Image: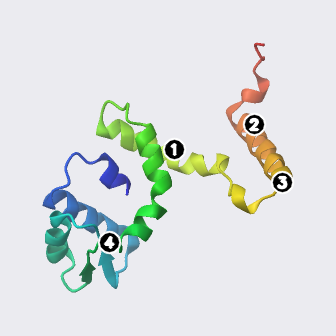
Amino acid sequence: MLDILVQGRRDKAAARRFFRRLLKTTRAVPRVVVTDKLRSHGAAHREVVPSVEHRCHKGLNDRAGNSHQPTRQRGRAMKGFRSVGAAQRFLAVFGGISPHFRPRRHLMTASNYHAEMTVRFAIRDRITGAANLPTTA
């Protein structure tokens, strides 16, 4: 999903590059490929993985789209980047750090959530050295 967010174009070459990178990282051939109705996805699919079934219908991509919603929210909030490279570098690092401060709140009671966040911020302060800084209040 990050590739789609930070790429300049959504043409056939970009879709082909995305499919190849996806197949290389997963190291498995999918049973079905579900995309939106963008014509470049179909053209790239026919070149890269013609033996795999390709489905593009209005409602089929909803599940995949909703699973990437946190990524899309971060992407919307960070529109101020000067270049695609800067956005990619930041998102690559931020993607690993962000879940540390976003526990699955809906699975916890309020007291457990507060205790967990206290522990997580203490870990952050210990790692960054922020615990030793004087407070200016």
Q: Looking at the image, is mark 4 or mark 2 earlier in the sequence? A: 4
Query: Outermost residue toward the top?
Result: 137
**What residue sits right under mark 3 in the picture?**
112
The mark nearer the N terminus, 1 or 2, is 1
Residue at point 26%, 48% (across, down): 7
Distance between the alpha carbons at the discs numbered 1 and 2: 19 Å
Q: Residue at x 48, y 63 (%)?
A: 67
Q: Residue at x 37, y 79 (%)?
A: 28
Tell me, for residue 23, which label it has, or none.
Answer: 4
Gap between marks 4 and 1, in whole Å?
Answer: 24 Å
Q: What is the quadrant of the C terminus in the image? A: top right
Q: Where on the picture, by quarter, is residue 45? A: bottom left
Q: Are marks 1 and 3 in contact (CB under 8 Å)?
A: no
Q: Are marks 1 and 2 in contact (CB under 8 Å)?
A: no
Residue 117 figure quarter:
top right
Q: Residue 124: which numbered mark, if any?
A: none
Going by the image, does 69 lie left or right of 131?
A: left
What's the distance in space between the residues labelled 2 and 3, CA to CA? 21 Å
- Element carrying mark 2: helix
Q: Residue 112 at x, y = what percent?
A: 83, 54
Disc 1 versus disc 3: nearer the observer: 3
Name the residue beneath numbered marker 2: 126
- Do the residues bearing badges 2 and 3 touch, measured as CB atoms within 8 Å? no
Neighbour class for label 1 at 10 Å: few (<14), some, many (≥20)? few
Specify whether 3 is left or right of 72: left
- The reply to whether the C-beta atoms of the residues labelled 4 and 2 are less than 8 Å apart is no
Q: Circle 1 — which element?
A: helix
| Among numbered discs 4 and 1, the one appearing first in the sequence | 4
Residue 94: image tag: 1
Amino acid at circle 2: Arg
